[in-house]
Amino acid sequence: MRAKVKSVALTDTGRIREHNEDTIGAEPDIALYVLADGMGGYNAGEVASGIAVKTIVNLVREAFQVQELEGADRATGLMRPTIILRDAILRANKIIHQTSKTQPQCEGMGTTVVAALFYDDKIITAHVGDSRLYRLRGDRFEQMTMDHSLLQELVDRGFYSQEEAARSTNKNYVTRALGVEPAVEVEVHEHPVDKGDYYVLCSDGLSDMVEDEDIHLTISTFNDNLETIVKQLVQLSNEHGGRDNISVIMTQVIDSFPARRGILDRILGWFG
């Protein structure tokens, strides 16, 4: 998958915060990318985001390895990739919540998370909170995840327009986060990918500081140079105030990546 999906990631403390509570992780061999934005007193936010990313990356990688060894096709085997990713996030939620209850210095900690898993010419997206995933396809730039936030709920109910929400100063009240409760609802979706697609995973340190149009313009300006794009986005966030930690993962689909088909698929194909 390294040759099929290119990626570059960068995280920055920003100009106001004393330390970075964001964590980013990647497993390029299976094209898995995870970004978490921690919250909590002292250093608890970075503990929560670190647990989230480490748990999700490890569990998804291990699940794929087990199914490879057992000869199960990942699309039709014991577990679908959507379930693998969702269950890994649910497990991370339990670990963070348990840690917050048993370690006094971690009381009240939590984290948002957004994850992308590329498989069988699709992207599987999963998120909790207001960390986002965007897609640039051709000239169309769009937000693929919907924030789990009070502001977004007010937009959905018609109290704010999207334009008014973009100008609001109350953007950071999330309605879901990992570790806050014993259980959490993970939003998971599958989307087909096209060769040439760009995907951006980011914490609100980027999306609160930089307008969507400027993110789009930055990607279009620097085109295939993912490293320059990521550096420019972080720089823009800091130039606009850098009030929060800034994390960005950029990916670009270079070629198609259909899943290997198992025996069952081939037999069914004969009768299709």
Image (cartoon, helix red, strand yellow):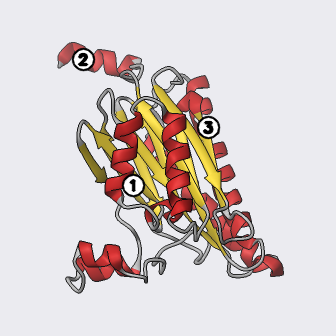
Q: Are marks 1 and 3 in contact (CB under 8 Å)?
A: no
Residue lying at the far bottom in this picture: please name it: 159
Tag 1 secondary structure: strand
Q: Quadrant of residue 29?
A: top right
- Residue of label 1: 188
Query: Which image quadrant is residue 266 in?
Result: top left
Q: Mark 3 points at which residue?
A: 61
For disc 1, the neighbor class at 10 Å (few under 14, some 14 to 19, many from 20) is some
| Residue 43 in the image, given as x and y percentages of width and height | 77, 71
Give residue 72's position: percent from left, percent from top: 50, 27
The extreme top residue here reads 270
Q: What element carries label 3?
A: helix
Dot 1 or dot 3, earlier in sequence: 3
Residue type (three-letter) at the residue carrying disc 1: Val
Q: Where is residue 76 in the image (x, y as percent from the top left)?
A: 39, 32
Q: Residue at x 23, y 86 (%)?
A: 159
Q: Name the side, left or right, on which 270 lies relative to 221.
A: left
Residue that numbered label 2 is attached to: 269
> Closer to us: mark 2 or mark 3?
3
Amino acid type, label 2:
Gly
**Residue 183 found in image quarter:** bottom right
Of pointers 2 and 3, the one earlier in the residue sequence: 3
